[in-house]
Amino acid sequence: MILVFGGTTEGRKAVEVLEEACSNYFYSTKAGEQELLLHNGQRIDGAMNGEALRLFCREQQIRLIVDAAHPFATQLHETIAEVAGMLAIPVVRYERIYPPRDPDITWIDDYSQVPTDIHTLLATTGVQSISKLKWLDAQGVKVYYRILPRKSSIALAHQQGAKDEQLCFYELNSEQNHEDRPHDLRCATITGVSPHDSVEAILMKESGLSGGFQEKVDAAKAKGMRIIALKRPQTPANFTIVNGPYGLRRAVEKLLPEFYPLHSGLTTGTCATAAAIAATRHLLYDEQPNEVPVVLPNGETIMVDVRYGEDCAYCIKDAGDDPDVTDGLEIGAFAEHTLMLGRRSLIDIEGGMGVGTFTLPGFDYPPGSPAINKAPREMICKNIEPLIDEHTPLNITIFVPQGEEIAKRTFNPRLGIEGGISIIGVSGIVKPFSEEAFIDSIRKCMTVAKASGSDRVVINSGGKSERFVKALYPDLPRQAFVEYGNYIGETLKMAHELHFENVTLGVMLGKAVKLAAGHLDTHSRKVTMDKDFIRQMLREAGCDIDISGITLARELWDRLPEDKKSDFARIVISHCAEHCCPLLPNGQLTILLIDDEGHIYPK
């Protein structure tokens, strides 16, 4: 059993990660004020001292603790470390992502180090810090405290010696924990300060990106305020540190393997990035670490094992439990110095042995380019740039020794990728799902969407389409957006069973042309686009274009005349509706077709 300490944005994200397992766990908060819907988790509220935590862990047979509490909950972290050490329970610390420490900020280790060469200070460090800042009164520093507009917070502020004219408030937001929200800095109109005056300095905690730290810094700088920041406490040395959902899942899979029925893996893009980082560090610094940190597209960092060969580094592709023919492949990288003359960038990425070549249009790069997609290229550059300077341009060559042989067992030849595998991966992590498990996960999400009270559910194929459609429904709760993957038919049946009055189906063209032809499961293993049927739809829309050379449906957007895109979209949507509407006999279905730029049809 897993015990999560939350109450924060990270706690909410930890719940999302653990819910994917459909296994039971506990979720603990101090005050019980965080609004959170748990499907497999059991909520427990109220503070636990060391003895209470020790007894709970023994009685509930806790085998893993996830510490996703606020970074400044020092006492809780220490209690967790003590009890976990006593009971030999591993701890995963779900840490925040922190920007590099700005040299223009005054950094302090504790409240006694606040500079006294200021006259006015706005403290955003919470009501509990008031007593720790009262010593500034004797130094002639006028301190204003931004606190929660709650009777209990105001009473506690008074108990610690704060006066009414020193208190100012920020608005509560039910969607986020108050400690994790970017706070506004309307410092010129706070209680007790004349609109013509200004607060000279602001005191804040190093609360990380999810705590709105950078937003507060930017706002304070815009007002010309001096910024003083309290450094975050050190994490106990025996904790495993992660700073994002993928890292958390992989840590749980490693420390408690049975929690997830299927384990995640790494994309070829992540493996190539890890190899490139290791090769660069070996070239520039003569280092050969056994693992390297890889920053994923979502900003989090995971550690990836690497190995070394002669003048190169490589990573063993780990597909987890996903059925992937590239599992176990060596994906390597060479890093070489090069001249800056004639280059457009500091880092050039090339394809070596076993990496395929694009031979047809429709991909991120033109024919003749190595089959390394945009997201992996960006990952490689983002991870290597901090290791080099403007005087050290590099060539990175990605190679896969068995790539050409393995590629024959993939769809690459059909797509026009020749000579090897493609280096792909948008998120950097592969989440494995059997068909049954995936459909079960959709059903749970649909049930949660219904429980949110929304009369509309918005179903999308993935994060990209969801991001575009969300802008059309800003008032819907986040639970009302559900990913169907490829299982459009199954998801619509669930919407009917749950009596949703309104369903919005967001779909991109690749899946839409399959759906329009009557395929309610659009997985590429089961169905490919039917060019003859696409030609039929083009004729219905009055479009006369040649599609004989296309390999991907999204290429149609580039070939369609601008004045015909809406007509074609209307025809595609109408065919999709023929197959989808019967599955939702008592509800209203809205189908939205989305292109790669985020344009939504009907307009």
Image (cartoon, grey):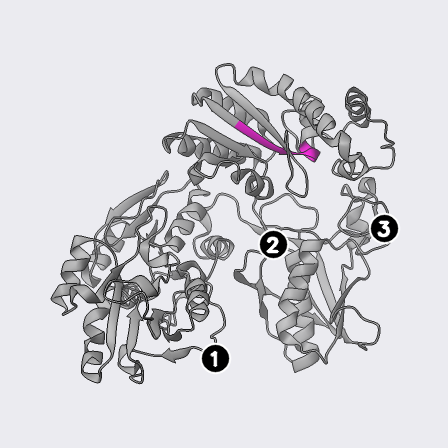
x 77%, y 51%: residue: 421
Q: Amino acid at mark 1?
A: Pro
User: In the rendering, at what x and y percent does residue 595 appear?
Assistant: 68, 38
Q: Quadrant of residue 141?
A: bottom left
Q: Helix, strand, or loop for circle 1?
A: loop
Q: Would residue 20 appear left or right of 86 to someone viewing this image?
A: right
Q: Which residue is mark 2?
A: 428
State which tag comes first along the sequence, 2 or 3: 3
Report, in whole angstroms, how far the alpha carbon at label 2 lies from the one at label 3: 24 Å
User: In the rendering, at what x and y percent does residue 599 appear?
Assistant: 65, 38
Q: Quadrant of residue 344?
A: bottom right
Q: Amino acid at mark 3?
A: Pro
Query: The magenta stretch spans which residues?
Result: 504-511
Q: Which residue is mark 3?
A: 367
Q: Is residue 524 visible?
A: no
x 38%, y 61%: residue: 90
Report, in whole angstroms, how far the alpha carbon at label 3 lies from the one at label 1: 46 Å
x 77%, y 47%: residue: 363
Image mark for residue 323: none
- Number of marks: 3
For label 1, count other residues whose C-alpha is less than 10 Å away and answer few (under 14), some (14-19) or many (20+): few
User: In the rendering, at what x and y percent does residue 246 appear?
Assistant: 51, 54
Q: Is residue 142 visible?
A: yes
Residue 392, above or below 425: below
Nearer to us: label 3 or label 1: 1
